[in-house]
Image (cartoon, coloured by chain):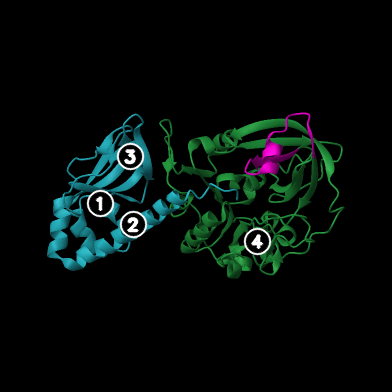
Amino acid sequence: MAALAERQAVPLLDPRIPRLLQIRRVRRETRDTWTLDLIGSDAGEPFAPGQFAMLYAPGVGEVPISISGDPASPEVITHTVRAVGPTTRALCGLRAGDVLGWRGPYGHPWPLEAVPSGADVVIVAGGIGLAPLRPAVLRVLADRARFRRIALLYGARTPGELLFRRDLERWRSRLDTEVEITVDAGDAGWRGNVGVVTTLIPPAKFDPARAVALVCGPEVMMRFTVGDLRKRGLPPERIFLSLERNMHCGVGLCGRCQFGPRFICREGPVFSYAEVERHFTIREV
Amino acid sequence: METLESLLAEHEFFRGLTREDIVLFTECASNVRFETGAYIFREGQPADQFFAVRHGRVALEVYVPGRGGVAIQTVGPGEVLGWSWMLPPYRWHFDARVLEQTRVLAFDATCIRDKCETDHRLGYELMKRLAHVFTQRLEASRLQLLDIYGRAG
């Protein structure tokens, strides 16, 4: 699995010129999160699970957002956006037929192609972190026979803040995939797990000797998740994280997203823990 | 054939104990099943047992007037349920409601406490294992307090 950690610089293709894409459909996922399906004559460029794009809300600003759609259907580009600032609020306020600026896809993806046949795949998502992992789940399930066990462990604050509910129900109904969901606080109708996502790791069914883990969520969640995966016996080079920093250009020119010696936009956002371990626990890197 | 002793030896919480210790714990154990919706214990009742979950899932709940039972944690296979039996006044602090049919090994608290008082080595072994559970749950509770999904990842 040494090849899992190898990477090359992403080629620069018209790096600062956005394309105009039209919103075909908007779905409200939660109180503050929307999923946008984008189409356009320039759409259709293949992307790999884990890549992101820079989305430009006209007159407001530009933000990096992971692609959350199905890599088997690149003619529709899907992003899931949480409204947390002026630009994301503007993006979440757009409606079907509106146009936005888009450039990408950027970044290094989850290393699914390098995962050996017969490996176990453990996917750990927290909150909005399920969005960049959704394409990976879809890709893994589309190629189900290549893998042994698949475990998706997902944590959210409340049942009302679970993303992709229809997907989750579909994935849970499969007999060949373990899907465990937990929330920090249940409500009257919740019959599932209560507790943080890390509590799902000790009982999850996977063999650490042959497993690869994909992790995405807030950084503190990833830190504790890595700790529990390491306790289960996963080595750092088989734990992959999607990191987030304040990306601006998206193509490694501006340096805003520098993380130690790396630019997250060009060399990430996906890294093996072995690559970033040294800087991961340093404050304010 | 599954015996109480073999069920206990296979449970995650007791894994690695000597056969001698397994036998000692088995002397206080029984194999019990609870149906969905049942309460294994309720807040304020005497905490005269503790439980090692084999199958199923149990919610620890706090009753909040106007909201009903609010789940604060769920416990599943391989985990233990309840520690109010360890310290006076031996009363449960929460409700334990069965979310799906659950099979447990139930341990008589007085029997376990007496064995631990008699055999401090056994008691220390049990305390170390429980301390590990406490640590995990305390860490998980702290993460819940942090509201770790609050910011985009």
Magenta-highlighted residues: A77-100
Which residue corresponds to the image point at 52% horizontal and 54% vertical from the top-left?
A: A221
> Which residue, given by chain and number where applicable, does mark 3 sit on?
B61
Most foreground residue, A74 or B55: A74
| Inter-mark Cα distance, 3 to 2 | 18 Å
The disc at residue A271 is: 4
Label 1's element? loop
Vertical relation: A227 (above or below) A60: below
Q: On the rendered structure, is B7 left or right of B140?
A: left
Q: Are marks 3 and 1 on the same chain?
A: yes
The N terminus of chain A sits in image quarter: bottom right
Label 4, residues with CA under 10 Å away: few <14, some 14-19, many ≥20: many
Q: Amino acid at mark 2?
A: Val
Residue A42 percent coordinates (x, y) = 86, 41
The disc at residue B152 is: none
Residue A187 percent coordinates (x, y) = 42, 34
Vertical relation: A77 (above or below) A113: above
Q: Amino acid at mark 1?
A: Trp
Q: Amino acid at mark 3?
A: Glu
Q: Are marks 3 and 2 on the same chain?
A: yes
Does the segment drawn in magenta span residue A98?
Answer: yes
The disc at residue B133 is: 2
The C terminus of chain A sits in image quarter: bottom right
Question: Contact, CB < 8 Å: mark 2 with mark 4?
Answer: no
Which residue corresponds to the image point at 21% horizontal and 56% vertical from the top-left?
A: B25
